[in-house]
Image: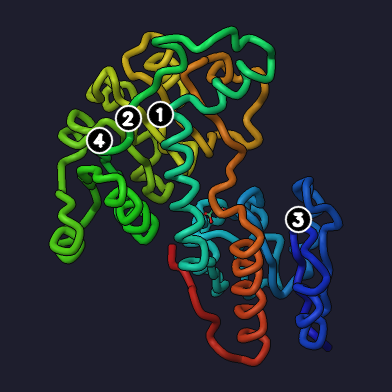
């Protein structure tokens, strides 16, 4: 009998087809709606492997129900949607999809930074809504990116990729990370800074740390108060890293100039969320890795991990809790 894989989101048939030799493939038949928890629970109960996306919360309750489960392939580099420690304790392997999304996510981080700096979306809306009356000496004016100071919080692969882009804009780059990256300092001339110094000295603060117990609420009232009044905060990592109530207050009272968010504590962000009332906030629906090429490469990583496992090999890109 073939093992069963349950795919928690509809994937293209050409991606799934190669798995059918080795697996009984079952799949949630919607690409745009998340699998409901009760369906996930029921499917997990008889699955040998699960293919998850970031909206699938795999916690102890699901793991307890999943008696046969041996492998979870998560289609993301971040894996905070999975209780990896609890999975590993049950002998379940968890894999993610690093590297293939690095440049795409760095592109988006830089695009959001630029869009926020120049309020591109606000300017477009003004035009589309017929409110563009004339060229104005100080109309539509934003913040310069070229030559500004960028503070990167979390200097991993994506941080390095953003830094390469920033160098093309002659930006001075500060970074804060758990460990110093001397090689990068030598190669790119970036400088390590304590978080408070980075916040106080940067024109743009870019959040790129993974979401975990240590980084939850890492940017709150105190940290936002340490930023420049002209400072701009960009978050493309996970919503819970920035305290949304504190960010709302900081933006509303102009303690910081603007923010750009690709991620939220709750996704999709509720339309009545107070943050969405603010004009100095640019928002995107978690699209960091969203290009066809990259999403296909992430799918391929998951297929490869499943195939390796079915052959009795150790899948690549395993993560530990
Ligand atoms: C990731 O890979 O962690 C992204 O946030 C999902 O695209």
Q: Are marks 2 and 1 in contact (CB under 8 Å)?
A: yes
On the image, numbered disc 3 is attached to which residue? 41
Cα separation between marks 3 and 4:
49 Å
Residue 243 showing in the rendered view: no
Cα separation between marks 2 and 1:
7 Å
Indicate the position of residue 193 as horizontal and vertical percent values.
15, 43
Q: Which quadrant does the C terminus fall into?
A: bottom left
Cα separation between marks 2 and 4:
7 Å
Q: Are marks 1 and 4 in contact (CB under 8 Å)?
A: no
The answer to which quarter of the image holds residue 268 is top right
On the image, numbered disc 4 is attached to which residue? 148
Q: Earlier in the sequence, mark 2 or mark 3?
A: 3
Instruction: Identify the element where label 3 is drawn.
Output: helix
At 79% from the left and 53% from the top, the residue drawn is 31
Instruction: Identify the element where label 2 is drawn.
Output: loop
Q: Are marks 3 and 1 in contact (CB under 8 Å)?
A: no
On the image, numbered disc 1 is attached to which residue? 117
At 57% from the left and 72% from the top, the residue drawn is 92
Is the distance from the Cβ of mark 2 to the nearest ligand 1 atom less than 8 Å? no
Q: Are marks 2 and 4 in contact (CB under 8 Å)?
A: yes
């Amino acid at each position: 009998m073939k093992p069963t894989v349950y795919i928690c989101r509809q994937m293209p048939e050409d991606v799934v087809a190669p798995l059918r030799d080795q697996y009984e493939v079952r799949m949630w038949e919607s690409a745009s709606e998340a699998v409901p928890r009760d369906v996930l629970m029921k499917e997990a109960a008889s699955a040998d492997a699960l293919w998850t996306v970031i909206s699938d919360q795999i916690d102890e309750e699901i793991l307890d129900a999943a008696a046969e489960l041996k492998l979870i392939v998560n289609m993301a580099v971040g894996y905070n949607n999975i209780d990896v420690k609890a999975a590993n304790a049950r002998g379940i392997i968890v894999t993610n999809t690093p590297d293939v999304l690095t440049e795409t996510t760095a592109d988006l981080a830089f695009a959001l930074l630029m869009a926020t700096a120049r309020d591109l979306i606000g300017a477009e809306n003004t035009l589309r809504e017929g409110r563009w009356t004339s060229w104005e000496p100080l109309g539509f004016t934003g913040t310069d990116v070229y030559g500004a100071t960028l503070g990167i919080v979390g200097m991993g692969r994506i941080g390095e990729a953003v830094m390469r882009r920033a160098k093309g804009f002659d930006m001075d780059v500060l970074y804060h990370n758990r460990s110093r990256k001397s090689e990068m300092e030598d190669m790119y001339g970036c400088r390590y800074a304590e978080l408070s110094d980075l916040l106080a000295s940067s024109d743009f603060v870019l959040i790129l740390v993974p979401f975990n117990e240590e980084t939850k609420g890492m940017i709150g009232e105190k940290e936002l108060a340490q930023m420049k009044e002209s400072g701009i905060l960009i978050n493309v990592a996970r919503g819970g890293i920035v305290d949304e109530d504190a960010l709302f207050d900081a933006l509303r009272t102009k303690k910081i100039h603007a923010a750009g968010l690709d991620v939220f504590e709750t996704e999709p962000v509720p339309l009545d969320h107070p943050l969405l009332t603010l004009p100095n906030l640019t928002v995107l629906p978690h699209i960091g890795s969203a290009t066809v090429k990259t999403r296909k490469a992430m799918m391929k990583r998951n297929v490869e991990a499943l195939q390796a496992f079915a052959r009795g090999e150790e899948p690549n890109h395993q993560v530990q809790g």
